[in-house]
Image (cartoon, grey):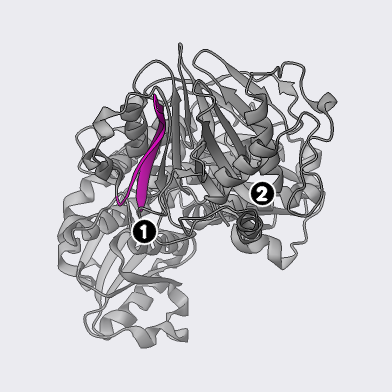
């Protein structure tokens, strides 16, 4: 969940590294640091707090090095502090390392290294990495048989496994030490490593944590996320697990886990670099809320028209395969899981296929009944969500076909899955997801239409649904006009301690997402419930002055939801209602009217006032909307 950046070229590395960290601060903001190779060896500058604190460090303006690594931290092992901030050095100051992920066996490794004379200055799991690399580096022999932690040889058993391109002086000793250290690491990691003995090279490696390499002209860039380096290049390499890259200014060599040279092609990413700028908005979150008309247009793309069937060039599902499915599983975390719940509604009603939605962190541990008659769909904005990737791997082992929905081309989940489709929402910088969520909802509903048409279940309902999807961008623009009305209500309730969200059918899914948004950025305790469950316990929490938010877009359920809201009004609750139905508005404290649309995609419109509601409450409280406490954008640890 931390952010990492690297640079090797002819320019001063320091300003490039700090610029990249600022663009990655949504990944972690407990502490930050950079390391460069200077004339007198490795330099490390780091401090507790936000990236901007680096500008105040004595000597940072004097750094001249043109090779460096950088890190912004989301604390896992050890409290936020200067000592625990990355980069970390080995005892001899030969190696400098930044790391994203978790080393699960770091206590065992730390004991091993301590027994061999190494001292530790931090509480982190990361600090064992440079010292372990140094251990193997200092022990290196041509036919190395150094003992690993479990007394087995974790290094290459013979030199004939090494690629013939590895010649003496070509980072051989450095690369072998890094490879042996990685053999001993259990867990997830994306690592950048500098070595003072090789001032013109750096090595990077990844396993279950994101890492991209950007190719420039006489320079190369590394980052955990594309937006950090998008202003420098649009050509990227993506590493698979346990692949190593040795970078110089003019070249990149890639090696597999046996240190065999491998070829990699670049992928061009057509995101606009300005997407990672605020462009006049106060916050990224507000900007991204207002980008939703365009993100939906891009997600719809040319997948269908009113008069044509849906097309996914990336997919080749047959009618026989879809008819043979016993079940669809949708697996995701947080907001993406809420998008999945809208997919359940669409797959079951349009395709008549039973569908389950699971929280990824729980999925593997309930022994899911997945087999070759299951289609498993995995949703992840970043494509790097650790729990979701682990669930995907389990489903593949059980013989199911897997399909990834992501916003990031080349991300881990898209490389693991049998099939991948993309939302094309563009970079989303704010930690709380907005445009990625609505794009996921639209894409998964289009996927359900696509399946229904393959199955021969086309109907007038689907024709009308497609028309409504095509009209969504314009209707989102209309919905955004409610901003001032929402802001007014937010000013009335921003000091609340508890807020409740109610809905029925797909509106209950929107209630879940609205409640999550409020928790994420305002730190107000909130709960969502199916409106009909209110009297089965939660109504005991309703007292005079409590705020209740109701969502009503499903025509056949409106009267029942109105009755449920009447129950809380009777007990003194303040009410905010989001609706596109004909109701008695005088009953409620405030009613936000949104355009009418098909209930399959009404969550796209009804969530927008709730995104704004959370945003304006957080602003009234003076909170950092884009970087809420304790949260990071991409959850790459389990």
**253 left or right of 518?**
right
Which structural element holds mark 1? Answer: helix
Foreground mark, 1 or 2, reads 2
Alpha-carbon neighbours of circle 1 within 10 Å: few (<14), some, or many (≥20)?
many
For the record, the magenta segment spans: 29-49
The answer to whether 157 is drawn above or below residue 575 in the figure is: above
From the image, tell me which residue sits under label 1.
517
Q: Which of 386/139 is in front?
A: 139
Q: Which of 32/583 is in front?
A: 32
> Circles 1 and 2: CB distance less than 8 Å?
no
Which structural element holds mark 2? Answer: loop
Between marks 1 and 2, how big is the CA–CA gap?
36 Å
Q: Say if residue 601 shows up in the picture.
A: yes
The answer to whether 635 is drawn above or below residue 56 in the figure is: below
Horizontal and vertical percent position of residue 448: 61, 44
Q: Main secondary structure of the magenta part?
A: strand
Count the marks: how many? 2
Quadrant hosting residue 183: top right
Please tell me whether residue 45 belongs to the stretch shown in magenta: yes
Horizontal and vertical percent position of residue 590: 21, 65
The answer to whether 552 is drawn above or below residue 8 in the figure is: below
Q: Please tell me which of labels 1 and 2 falls first in the chain.
A: 2
Horizontal and vertical percent position of residue 74: 42, 53
Picture residue at 37% right of the left edge, 58% below the top: 80
Q: Say if residue 453 shows up in the picture.
A: no
Q: Residue furthest bottom?
A: 540
Picture residue at 43% right of the left edge, 19% below the top: 233
Picture residue at 62% right of the left edge, 23% below the top: 171
């Amino acid at each position: 969940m931390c952010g990492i950046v690297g640079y090797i070229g002819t320019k001063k590395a320091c300003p490039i590294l700090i610029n990249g960290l600022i663009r990655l601060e949504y990944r972690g903001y407990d502490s930050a640091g950079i390391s460069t190779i200077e004339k007198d060896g490795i330099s490390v500058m780091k401090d507790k707090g936000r990236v901007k604190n680096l500008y105040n460090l004595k000597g940072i303006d004097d750094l001249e090095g043109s090779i460096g690594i950088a890190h912004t931290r989301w604390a896992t092992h050890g409290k936020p502090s200067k000592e625990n901030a990355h980069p970390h050095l080995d005892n001899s100051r030969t190696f400098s390392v930044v790391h994203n992920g978790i080393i699960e066996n770091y206590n065992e490794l730390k004991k091993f290294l301590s027994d061999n004379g190494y001292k530790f200055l931090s509480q982190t799991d990361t600090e064992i990495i440079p010292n372990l690399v140094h251990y193997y580096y200092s022990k290196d022999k041509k036919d190395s048989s150094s003992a690993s932690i479990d007394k087995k040889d974790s290094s290459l058993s013979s030199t004939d496994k090494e690629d013939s391109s590895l010649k003496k002086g070509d980072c051989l000793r450095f690369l072998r030490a890094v490879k042996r250290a990685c053999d001993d690491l259990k867990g997830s990691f994306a690592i950048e490593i500098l070595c003072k003995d090789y001032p013109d090279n750096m090595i990077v490696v990844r396993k279950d944590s994101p890492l991209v390499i950007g190719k420039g002209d006489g320079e190369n860039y590394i980052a955990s996320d594309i937006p950090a380096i998008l202003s420098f290049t649009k050509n990227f390499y993506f590493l698979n697990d346990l692949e190593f890259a040795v970078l110089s200014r003019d070249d990149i060599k890639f090696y597999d886990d046996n240190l065999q040279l491998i070829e990699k092609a670049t992928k061009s990413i057509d995101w606009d670099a300005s997407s990672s700028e605020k462009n006049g908005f106060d916050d990224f979150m507000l900007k991204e809320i207002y980008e939703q008309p365009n993100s939906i247009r891009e997600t719809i793309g040319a997948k269908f028209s009113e008069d044509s069937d849906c097309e996914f060039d990336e997919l080749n599902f047959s009618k026989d395969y879809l008819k043979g499915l016993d079940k669809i599983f949708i697996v995701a975390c947080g907001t993406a899981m809420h998008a999945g719940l809208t997919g359940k509604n669409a797959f079951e009603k349009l395709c008549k296929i039973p569908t389950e939605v699971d929280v990824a962190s729980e999925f593997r541990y309930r022994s899911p009944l997945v087999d070759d008659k299951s289609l498993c769909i995995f949703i992840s904005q970043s494509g790097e969500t650790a729990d979701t990737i682990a669930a995907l791997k389990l489903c593949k082992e059980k013989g199911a076909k897997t399909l990834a929905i992501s916003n990031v081309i080349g991300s881990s989940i898209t490389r693991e899955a049998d099939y991948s489709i993309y939302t094309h929402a563009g970079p989303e910088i704010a930690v709380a997801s907005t445009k990625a969520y609505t794009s996921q909802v639209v894409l998964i509903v289009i996927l359900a239409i696509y399946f229904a048409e393959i199955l021969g279940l086309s109907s007038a309902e689907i024709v009308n649904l497609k028309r409504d999807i095509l009209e969504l961008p314009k209707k989102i623009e209309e919905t955004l006009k409610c901003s001032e009305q929402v802001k007014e209500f937010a000013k009335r309730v921003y000091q609340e301690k508890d807020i409740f969200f109610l809905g029925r059918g797909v509106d209950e899914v929107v209630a879940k997402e609205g409640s999550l948004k409020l928790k994420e950025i305002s730190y107000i305790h909130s709960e969502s419930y199916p409106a009909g469950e209110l009297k089965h316990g939660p109504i005991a929490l309703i007292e005079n002055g409590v705020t209740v938010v109701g969502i009503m877009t499903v025509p056949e359920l409106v009267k029942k939801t109105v009755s449920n809201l009447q129950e809380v009004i009777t007990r003194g609750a303040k009410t905010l209602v989001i609706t596109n139905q004909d109701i008695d508005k005088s009953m409620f404290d405030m009613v936000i009217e949104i355009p009418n649309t098909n209930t399959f995609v009404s969550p796209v419109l009804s969530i927008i006032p709730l995104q704004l509601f959370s945003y304006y409450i957080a602003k009234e409280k003076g909170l950092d909307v884009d970087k809420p406490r304790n949260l990071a954008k991409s959850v790459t640890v389990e």
